Image: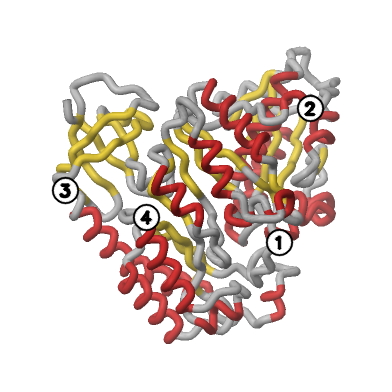
Amino acid sequence: MKTKTLKKDKVNIITLGCSKNMVDSEVLGGQLNANGIKVMHENTRLDHNIVVVNTCGFIDKAKEESVNTILEQVDLKRAGKLDKVYVTGCLSERYRNDLLKEIPEVDAWFGTMELPLILKQFNADYKTELVGERLLATPSHYAYLKISEGCNRTCSFCAIPLMRGKHVSKTIEEVVNEAKRLVQKGVKEIMLIAQELTYYGLDIYKKRALGDLLKHLSDIEGLTWIRLHYAYPSKFPLDILDVIKERDNICNYLDMPLQHISNNMLQAMKRQMDKQEIYDLVGEIRTRVPGICIRTTLITGFPGETRDDVDELKGFLEDVRLDRVGIFTYSHEENTSAHVLEDLIPAEEKEARAQEIMEVQQEISYEKNQEKIGNEYKVIIDKKEAGRYLGRTEFDSVEVDNEVIIESAERLNPGDFVQVRITKAYDYDLEGEVII
């Protein structure tokens, strides 16, 4: 590939959005690396000459961040600090034609499933023998593992099927082999991800096969923790709860996006469940796996949401006392079925409702954390910062959940597992000491 520089190409991959995008970037990095091209993730030294921006197109804030990042890279190119700027990912998949006109300085645009075409820009070949190989962008002791692509759901607010297509599962053998390779690289914790985890297997095995997959994964020697993210609640495969309970290396943790609780909103969002079914499912999960940590995400400000709906959601949180909650404000997305509805709730009101709901959850989180004082937990060490170690229990995922702040005279390394006694608790974090 000819560029303005005489030096060998060095590629920087910038990833925006979710962990699924992160995996795509890691796969691209692995393929480039195998073709003899030097590649880095989020390189801050600015000693690269080519950039690939992997964009997010999920909601307005994410789209704005993606566009701003592209413009920043284009400015660097104009200043002679970059030779090429390529853009891939969900924003590019969804708005490519518009972006071509608005930002002509970008050298090429690619969709979410066009990895071989990106590689062609580097005169690189897509190596099928490297399927499952990745250049990890995470610390070496944990990794995300995508078990499927796309989604068959028709949630009225969601544009992901427009960008990622229909659900396609990897085979159990493919996932297990990829997990084994990650463990060989030193990974001790794997977070299973998909657009919809609980749909896994229906397309290739004609049944929900997440439970079978978990059994195979949990048999991998050296894999200490397996964590489940993005488990859609409708038609939830209850058999996975039995596997979670019986297998020690599957975390007592479940990320299950509920989005709302009022029947009005659930129906308008096309969530295929009603309020009572959600209450029943949460109760069943807790009955089958006592002590399990349930994380969810919610949406406020959906068209037609009333004060009664907001109060109902707050009441739900007070009733079931979920362990972890994240909130999005509704984003009016083109080509979704909700786009025909009038988006009349002002952005300020959406934010105010989100804050109001999070204040309820903040109190719940504080009380639940206070109950942990004096208890002992197995903790994975993530990093050292300001002289103290930061880690997580099995009830906490990376970046989105609680951290355990640890004082230790003994040297600890990322990926170490230690027993920690909790000594202090805050709204969202814990403090503890290593038990010798």
Amino acid type at circle 2 is: Thr
Residue at 58% across, 49% down: 210
Of mark 2 and mark 3, the one earlier in the sequence is: 2
Dot 1: within a 10 Å radius of its alpha carbon, few (fewer than 14), some, or many (20 or more) residues?
Answer: some
The residue mark sitting in front, 2 or 4, is 4
Q: Does residue 71 appear in the picture of this structure?
A: no
Instruction: Establish if 399 lies above or below 77.
Output: below
**Of residues 392 and 377, the one drawn nearer to the viewer in this rendering:** 377
Mark pair 2, 1: CA separation? 27 Å
Q: Secondary structure at mark 2?
A: helix
Which residue is the site of mark 3?
Answer: 373
**Residue 53 pos. (x, y %):** 68, 39
Of mark 1 and mark 4, the one earlier in the sequence is: 1
**Of residues 161 and 103, the one drawn nearer to the viewer in this rendering:** 161
Residue at 42% across, 32% down: 224
- Quadrant where the image shows the C terminus: top left
Which residue is the site of mark 2?
Answer: 128
In this picture, residue 16 sits left or right of residue 286: right
Check residue 289 in the rendering and tell me which mark sits there, or answer none. Answer: 4
